Amino acid sequence: MTDRELLELARKASENSYSPYSKFPVGAALECSDGTVFTGCNIENAAYGDTICAERTAVVKAVSEGKRDFTRIAVWGNSRDYCYPCGSCRQVLSEFGRNIKVICGRGDGAYMSASLSEMMPFAFDF
Ligand code: THU
């Protein structure tokens, strides 16, 4: 699967977003080393802090199905700038691999990519 195809799965996943507060749907598509893909969307809550981001939805789905070895994640939002993962999502992703390729899309269809360690060079670990 190409980066563009993974990004399209992320965009498609954003259609399931529950985001009545921000009105900013986000989708993610997380690829595992065996080729399986788990998608996710942001799910907001009236208690705003209980919102879960699209990336973490995808990670939670994958890990709960026994997958922990990730190769790429695509993230898409209809934004002007690339839809980068927030700090919490970078930290959660870093738990499962510093070399995950992160593909960030934006509303006009353009995207950029970087490794997770480039995006978060000093992730917490102990
Ligand atoms: N959001 C994500 O889903 N992923 C991110 O990495 C950044 C932010 C969501 C959370 C919230 O529902 C909306 O975008 C606006 O912050």
Image (tube, helix red, strand yellow):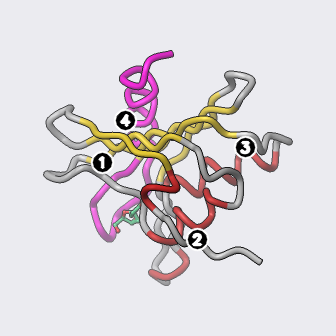
* Residue beneath disc 2: 123
The numbered disc on residue 77 is: 1
Query: Neighbour class for label 3 at 10 Å: few (<14), some, many (≥20)?
Result: many
At 30% from the left edge and 48% from the top edge, which residue is drawn? 77
Residue depicted at x 48% and y 64%: 120
Q: Please tell me which residue is depicted at 60% across the width and 54% down the height of the picture.
A: 57
Q: Is residue 42 left or right of residue 50?
A: left
Specify the label residue 62 is tagged with. Answer: 3
Q: Residue 124, image x and y in percent?
A: 64, 76
State yes or no: discs 3 and 2 in contact (Cβ < 8 Å): no
Q: Secondary structure at mark 2?
A: loop
Cα distance between the residues tagged 3 and 1? 21 Å
User: What amino acid is labelled 2 in the image?
Assistant: Ala
Crowd band around label 1 with a 10 angstrom C-alpha radius: few (<14), some (14–19), many (20+) = many
Secondary structure found at label 4: helix
Up the image or down, 121 lies above or below 29; here it is below
Give the CA separation, mark 3 to mark 4.
Answer: 18 Å
For the residues bearing labels 2 and 1, Cβ distance under 8 angstroms: no
Region in magenta: 1-26
Viewer-closest of 49 and 76 = 76
